[in-house]
């Protein structure tokens, strides 16, 4: 497990607006929802849609391609929207010393 700094602080991240972060081996979407930071894979488990282009509605990130919905906290797929699997999540938090947002991946 490696921690990556993204060069932003929590207040730099707008509420409910996904931000894509490329980590080399893959990319992650960071979402601030209700003031809490969450991270999930940027690739939709249905057909690889770009989740960074999705919208957050009711605590779920909605894929822009076919509408799959994923809980922003757990990555759980909402099966009433699209039959697909959960998306991988990542721990995202502010470094207590610097305030920089860090991803564990
Ligand atoms: S690619 Fe995301 S719902 Fe189909």
Image (tube, rainbow, N blue to C red):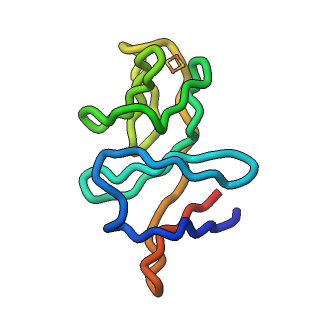
Taking 80 as reference, is 9 above or below it? below
Taking 94 as reference, is 52 above or below it? above
- Residue 100 placement (x, y as % from top left): 47, 74
**36 relative to 30 in the view: left or right:** left
Question: Where on the picture, by quarter, is residue 18?
Answer: top left
Nearer to me, 103 or 75: 103
Q: Can you say which quadrant of the picture contains the N terminus?
A: bottom right
- Residue 29 placement (x, y as % from top left): 51, 46
Q: Can you say which quadrant of the picture contains the C terminus?
A: bottom right
| Residue at the spot 46% in from the left edge and 68% down from the top edge | 8
**34 relative to 60 in the view: left or right:** left
| Residue at the spot 75% in from the left edge and 49% down from the top edge | 25
Taking 61 as reference, is 35 above or below it? below
Instruction: Name, please, the residue furthest toward the bottom.
Output: 97
- Residue 67 placement (x, y as % from top left): 41, 18
Taking 9 as reference, is 26 above or below it? above
| Residue at the spot 63% in from the left edge and 51% down from the top edge | 22
**Number of numbered discs visible in the structure rendering:** 0
| Residue at the spot 30% in from the left edge and 45% down from the top edge | 16
**56 relative to 97 in the view: left or right:** left
Instruction: Name, please, the residue furthest toward the right.
Output: 25
- Residue 39 placement (x, y as % from top left): 49, 50
**104 relative to 11 in the view: left or right:** right
């Amino acid at each position: 497990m490696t921690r990556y700094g993204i060069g932003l602080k929590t207040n730099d991240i707008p509420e409910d607006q996904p931000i894509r972060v490329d980590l080399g081996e893959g990319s992650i979407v960071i979402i601030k929802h209700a003031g809490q930071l969450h991270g999930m894979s940027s690739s939709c488990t249905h057909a690889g849609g770009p989740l960074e282009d999705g919208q957050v509605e009711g605590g779920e990130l909605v894929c822009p391609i076919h509408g799959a919905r994923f809980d922003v906290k757990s990555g759980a797929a909402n099966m009433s929207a699209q039959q697909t699997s959960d998306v991988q999540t990542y721990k995202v938090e502010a470094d207590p010393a610097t305030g920089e947002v860090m991803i564990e991946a």
